[in-house]
Amino acid sequence: MPIMIKLDDLLHARRMTLTDLATRVDITLANLSILKTGKAKAIRFSTLEAICRELECQPGDLMGFAAD
């Protein structure tokens, strides 16, 4: 899939674990893990908003596009 999720990089830069983020945005660790590994097929805007709020980032910081 040409959409890349850069959640690991953002978490590392903010010294935060996936578990911390899951707790802060009230998303299950399993669902956040699916997003982090790039296996998610969609993301709700409310979820994207919550992640961006907690990580103090823009949606473009969280996702990237790599053409094949």
Image (tube, rainbow, N blue to C red):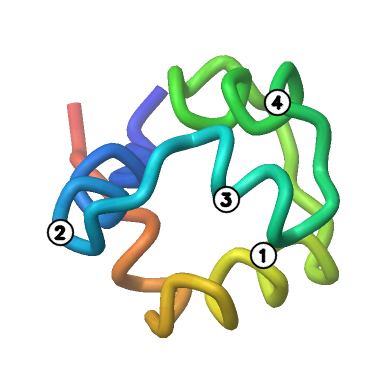
**x and y percentages locating residue 55 in the rendered image:** 44, 71
Q: Is residue 20 left or right of residue 37?
A: right
Mark nearer the N terminus (3 vs 2): 2
User: In front: mark 2 or mark 1?
Assistant: 2
Q: Which residue is mark 1?
A: 48
Inter-mark Cα distance, 1 to 3: 12 Å
Indicate the amino acid at tag 2. Answer: Ala
Indicate the amino acid at tag 3. Answer: Leu
Q: Secondary structure at mark 4?
A: helix
Q: Place residue 41 in its image quadrant.
A: top right
Residue at x-position 38% and y-position 60%: 62
Q: Is residue 64 left or right of residue 55?
A: left
Do the numbered discs 1 and 3 sit on residues whose CB atoms are within 8 Å? Answer: no
**x and y percentages locating residue 26 in the rendered image:** 84, 52
Inter-mark Cα distance, 3 to 2: 13 Å
Examine the rendered structure and indicate whether residue 33 appears above or below residue 51. Answer: above
Inter-mark Cα distance, 2 to 1: 18 Å
Inter-mark Cα distance, 1 to 4: 15 Å
In the rendered structure, find residue 29 and report the number of the disc placed on it: 4
Please name whichever residue, 67 or 10, is drawn nearer the observer in this view of the structure.
Answer: 10
Q: Which residue is mark 2?
A: 13
Q: Secondary structure at mark 2?
A: helix
In the rendered structure, find residue 28 and report the number of the disc placed on it: none
In the rendered structure, find residue 21 and report the number of the disc placed on it: 3
Inter-mark Cα distance, 3 to 4: 9 Å
Q: Place residue 56 in its image quadrant.
A: bottom left
Do the numbered discs 2 and 1 sit on residues whose CB atoms are within 8 Å? Answer: no
Mark nearer the N terminus (4 vs 2): 2
